[in-house]
Image (spheres, helix red, strand yellow):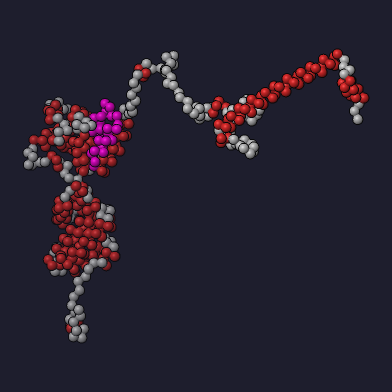
């Protein structure tokens, strides 16, 4: 049931009995309501037309079944705006711009603090390698030289040096290489001489080489603390470098009468003496000898034979050890074992047997001869024993007694002793075979 006042108002409205104030208020309300309807209908029709055109242009974002927004659809759903993607699809993180957009070249701004007049022309970019100082040079060069002593490839060293910016300290590479080789072996000094020869004209010049040897002559007293033979070795380096045309011929003439240090004078005198000798007497190409595996096999065999014969005369194990180490062929020590055993088989008396066993025992204890080299040397003798027996009739019996002695002194293993071949012999009737001969 409605109230009497509401019924009276409705009856007045139906009958048209409006007061002037009520009629004016009612008309104002109707006008406002009509304006709102017109504004709302116009915005809806506009958004509907634009959304339909976008859906026709992009078939992927159109959902015919009306199941809500399609994934990756960037249209606004808040009712605000026109329903188009933000910035036309050209905005957002990591977006380069709208499809088909072409960026123009921006002219440099003169007011920019990074503006460079010189760089505005044809700019050429190049890789700049910083120059090494003395400390960095020594840290970089030492591994290169040590690795070169292992592989001996001068071309690889040239390639590594070209990648470095040695600058004004370029000559110090030669002085560092020579200083390291003075503390090493004869083979290292031979490799260093070859390296200096190959670097001249490609990485270093003759003036750089002369400057390097000038520095070594000044540092010679300090080098003698670690290498007492440094003056003689440096003299050989200088003579070899001049012979290889790595140093100018006038290098020695510059120091005549101008040297105060006795050690430097000894080095220069050594170089002058070597250069004054005839080529038939001294070949400077072999001033350091031929190191390690570069030696011919015949030469190594001859050296080891001479070493063993000298030991049988002198009996000095230390001297024999030094000579074997100087050969620098640890992979060829089985030849020394082979030659020692053969000398025992060809010798007369027990003196050579005991001395050779003592020598092999000494080399075995200090690790100069390994198990593999020892076994290989004895096995070579085992294989050639039938041929040796032609010249030495009692070779089998001598071999058996020598292997037993070596086993007692812990020079060889039991397995190696048991593998020693024994010569079979015939047994006759007198040995109790009942008149039969045992084959």
Task: Provide residue 178's location: percent of width, then percent of height.
Answer: 22, 36
Q: Is residue 117 above or below residue 275?
A: above
Residue reaching furthest right?
4
Quarter of the image where one finds residue 233? top left
Task: Provide residue 179's location: percent of width, then percent of height.
Answer: 24, 36
Image position of 41 (left or right of 188)? right
Quarter of the image where one finds residue 61? top right
Q: Residue at x 85, y 14 (%)?
A: 21
Q: Quadrant of the image for the C terminus?
A: bottom left
Residue reaching furthest front?
15
User: Is residue 371 visible from the viewing direction of this image?
Assistant: yes
Residue nearest the observer in this picture, 372 or 14 = 14
Q: Quadrant of the image for the N terminus?
A: top right
Q: Is residue 406 above or below residue 268?
A: below
Find out whether residue 160 is within the magenta segment. yes
Residue nearest the observer in this picture, 375 or 315 = 375
State which region is magenta: 152-176
């Amino acid at each position: 049931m409605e109230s009497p006042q509401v019924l009276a108002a409705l009856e007045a409205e139906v009958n048209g009995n409006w007061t002037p104030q009520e009629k004016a208020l009612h008309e104002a309300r109707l006008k406002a309501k009509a304006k709102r309807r017109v504004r709302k209908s116009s915005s809806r029709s506009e958004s509907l037309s634009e959304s339909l055109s976008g859906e026709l242009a992009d078939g992927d974002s159109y959902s015919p079944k009306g199941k809500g927004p399609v994934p990756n659809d960037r249209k606004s759903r808040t009712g605000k705006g026109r329903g188009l993607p933000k910035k036309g699809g050209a905005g957002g993180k990591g977006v380069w711009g709208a499809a088909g957009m072409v960026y123009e070249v921006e002219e440099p701004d003169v007011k920019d603090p990074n503006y460079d007049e010189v760089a505005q022309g044809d700019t050429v970019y190049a890789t700049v390698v910083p120059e090494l100082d003395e400390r960095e040079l020594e840290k970089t060069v030492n591994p290169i030289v040590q690795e070169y002593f292992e592989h001996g490839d001068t071309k690889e060293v040239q390639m590594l040096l070209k990648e470095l910016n040695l600058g004004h300290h370029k000559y110090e590479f030669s002085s560092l290489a020579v200083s390291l080789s003075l503390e090493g072996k004869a083979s290292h000094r031979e490799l260093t001489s070859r390296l200096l020869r190959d670097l001249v004209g490609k990485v270093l010049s003759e003036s750089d080489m002369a400057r390097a040897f000038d520095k070594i002559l000044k540092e010679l007293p300090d080098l003698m603390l670690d290498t007492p033979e440094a003056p003689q070795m440096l003299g050989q380096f200088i003579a070899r470098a001049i012979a290889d045309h790595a140093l100018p011929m006038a290098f020695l003439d510059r120091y005549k009468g101008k040297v105060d240090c006795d050690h430097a004078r000894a080095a220069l005198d050594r170089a002058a003496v070597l250069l004054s000798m005839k080529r038939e007497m001294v070949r400077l190409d072999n001033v350091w000898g031929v190191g390690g595996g570069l030696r011919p096999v015949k030469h190594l065999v001859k050296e080891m034979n001479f070493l063993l014969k000298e030991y049988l005369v002198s009996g000095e194990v230390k001297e024999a050890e030094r000579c074997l180490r100087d050969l620098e062929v640890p992979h060829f020590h089985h030849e020394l074992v082979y030659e020692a055993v053969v000398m025992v088989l060809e010798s007369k008396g027990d003196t050579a047997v005991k001395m050779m066993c003592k020598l092999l025992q000494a080399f075995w204890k200090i690790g100069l001869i390994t198990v593999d080299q020892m076994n290989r040397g004895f096995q070579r003798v085992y294989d050639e024993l039938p041929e040796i027996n032609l010249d030495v009739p009692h070779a089998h019996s001598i071999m058996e007694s020598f292997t037993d002695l070596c086993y007692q002194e812990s020079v060889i293993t039991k397995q190696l002793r048991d593998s020693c071949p024994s010569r079979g012999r015939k047994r006759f009737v007198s040995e109790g075979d009942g008149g039969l001969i045992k084959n």
